Image (cartoon, rainbow, N blue to C red):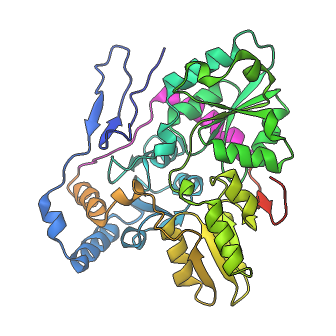
């Protein structure tokens, strides 16, 4: 059976690059190459000049993508900004592009490679920019879970993975009749899945799965959590058999920093401040929020809000700060009193961006992310099923006084 050597957030800098079987010699794990100390000594003005010069010289051959959570010193160089799926779709539409530099994390670059033409080279400026949530669903663990869940079970199980997952997890879902979902279209994809099977295995973020299913009217007692660190996921066969939703025990470390206590404090001190959170937050946070929705929903909601409105937002701090800087007629702050940032994405620095562009200018492609052919094939299937369930506008998963 095909196995992929995967990035492991516990060992920063490691990255899977090939298959562990077959006639080719596997290249196993590669470290993020150290860049010259000279880059650390560069001033901001010189970095801007050199990156701008490379962009001008490469023209339409180069596309730089930046996720909303990226730091401003990198974000300013973006040709396109957005969430991970939107950026991958944009990349696939750039017909003249030869190089796509994705300033995000590894699963985003994988998705871009899956959706772009074979001739396009997708580059991640720092290979240590991973995603702890994506790494919580390992292919070996998922296959072990599948064997347990499907043994002696007549119910059809549809595996659904959040797009924030590794390419081989997307491929697993595609090959087993399932699909990917985004935080925007998770309700549509879950509805699609339940029309095709009696049960859903939801990967890798239990909170998005739980919050979405609850908002659709499914009771909590229809859900169980599968813990890959426990034998049989910590479940009895009866629990697995009677559950309608099996939620993988994974989470986003950033969105776990928002708490019910923070919500209560805001409501007590400033009842006129609207609490808007991402559905990756814990259920008790979602229950207390006024609005819940994806990154794109958060941006559009705040942008369209009336002047002088007040917001407490539960998502990554770079996005919140950027909204506060651009929407100056509104009072925007983080729901938390601590800095909630995506530390792995923060590893993509202006220096690493300049380094990969310097290498391109010298005729060398470094840090290319290449998804193996068999994984790519089934990832495309899972992504296409997801794209069939994308609405034109991001919608709220839950709102004020909605029981979730």
Magenta segment boundaries in residue numbering: 364-388
Which of the 4 image quarters holds residue 164?
top right
Vertical side of 291 occupied by 43: above or below: below
> Which residue does the image show at 36% across and 72% down from the upper left?
73
In the picture, measured across the screen, residue 151 lies left or right of residue 58, that is right
Q: Is residue 383 magenta?
A: yes
Q: Is residue 140 magenta?
A: no
In this rendered view, identify the residue nearer to me: 14 or 171. Answer: 14
In this rendered view, identify the residue nearer to me: 183 or 86. Answer: 183
Point out residue 145 in the picture as x, y percentages from the top left corner. 60, 21
> Which residue does the image show at 59% across and 38% down from the upper left?
204
Vertical side of 334 occupied by 356: above or below: above
- The reply to whether residue 389 is visible in this rendering is no
Which of the 4 image quarters holds residue 259?
bottom right
Point out residue 292 in the picture as x, y percentages from the top left corner. 72, 62
> Which residue does the image show at 27% across and 47% down from the upper left?
366
Vertical side of 182 occupied by 46: above or below: below
Point out residue 23 in the picture as x, y percentages from the top left corner. 33, 13
Vertical side of 315 occupied by 165: above or below: above
In the picture, measured across the screen, residue 131 lies left or right of residue 48, that is right
Point out residue 224 in the picture as x, y percentages from the top left corner. 71, 32
Quick one: which residue is furthest to the top in this view? 152
Marks counted in the figure total 0
């Amino acid at each position: 059976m095909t196995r992929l050597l995967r990035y492991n957030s516990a060992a920063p800098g490691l990255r899977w690059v090939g298959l562990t079987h077959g006639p080719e010699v596997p290249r196993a794990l590669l470290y993020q190459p150290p860049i010259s100390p000279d880059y650390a000594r560069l001033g901001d003005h010189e970095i801007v000049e050199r990156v701008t010069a490379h962009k001008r010289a490469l023209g339409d051959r180069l596309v730089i993508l930046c996720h909303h959570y990226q730091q401003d010193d990198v974000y300013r160089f973006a040709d396109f900004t957005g969430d991970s799926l939107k950026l991958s779709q944009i990349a696939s539409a750039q017909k003249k592009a030869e190089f796509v530099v994705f300033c995000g994390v590894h699963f985003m670059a994988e998705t871009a490679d899956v959706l772009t033409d074979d001739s396009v080279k997708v580059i991640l400026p720092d290979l240590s920019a991973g995603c702890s949530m994506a790494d919580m669903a390992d292919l070996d663990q998922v296959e072990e879970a599948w064997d347990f869940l499907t043994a002696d079970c007549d119910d059809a199980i549809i595996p659904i993975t959040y797009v924030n997952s590794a390419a081989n997890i997307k491929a697993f879902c595609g090959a087993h009749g399932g699909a990917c979902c985004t935080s925007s279209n998770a309700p549509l994809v879950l509805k699609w899945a339940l029309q095709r099977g009696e049960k859903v295995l939801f990967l890798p973020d239990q909170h998005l799965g739980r919050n979405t299913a609850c908002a659709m009217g499914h009771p909590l007692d229809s859900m169980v959590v599968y813990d890959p660190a426990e034998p049989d996921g910590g479940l009895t066969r009866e629990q697995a058999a009677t559950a309608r939703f099996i939620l993988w025990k994974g989470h986003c470390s950033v969105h776990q920093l928002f708490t019910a206590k923070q919500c209560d404090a805001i409501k007590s001190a400033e009842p006129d401040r609207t609490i808007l959170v991402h559905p990756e937050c814990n259920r008790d946070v979602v229950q207390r929020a006024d609005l819940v929705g994806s990154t794109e929903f958060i941006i559009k909601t705040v942008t369209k809000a009336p002047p002088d409105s007040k917001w407490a937002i539960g998502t990554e701090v770079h996005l919140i700060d950027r909204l506060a800087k651009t929407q100056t007629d509104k009072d925007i702050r983080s729901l938390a009193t601590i800095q909630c940032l995506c530390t792995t994405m923060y590893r993509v620095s202006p220096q690493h961006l300049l380094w990969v562009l310097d290498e391109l200018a010298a005729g060398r492609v470094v840090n290319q992310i290449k998804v193996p052919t068999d994984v790519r094939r089934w990832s495309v299937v899972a992504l296409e099923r997801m794209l069939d369930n994308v609405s034109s506008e991001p919608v709220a998963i839950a709102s004020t006084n909605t029981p979730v």
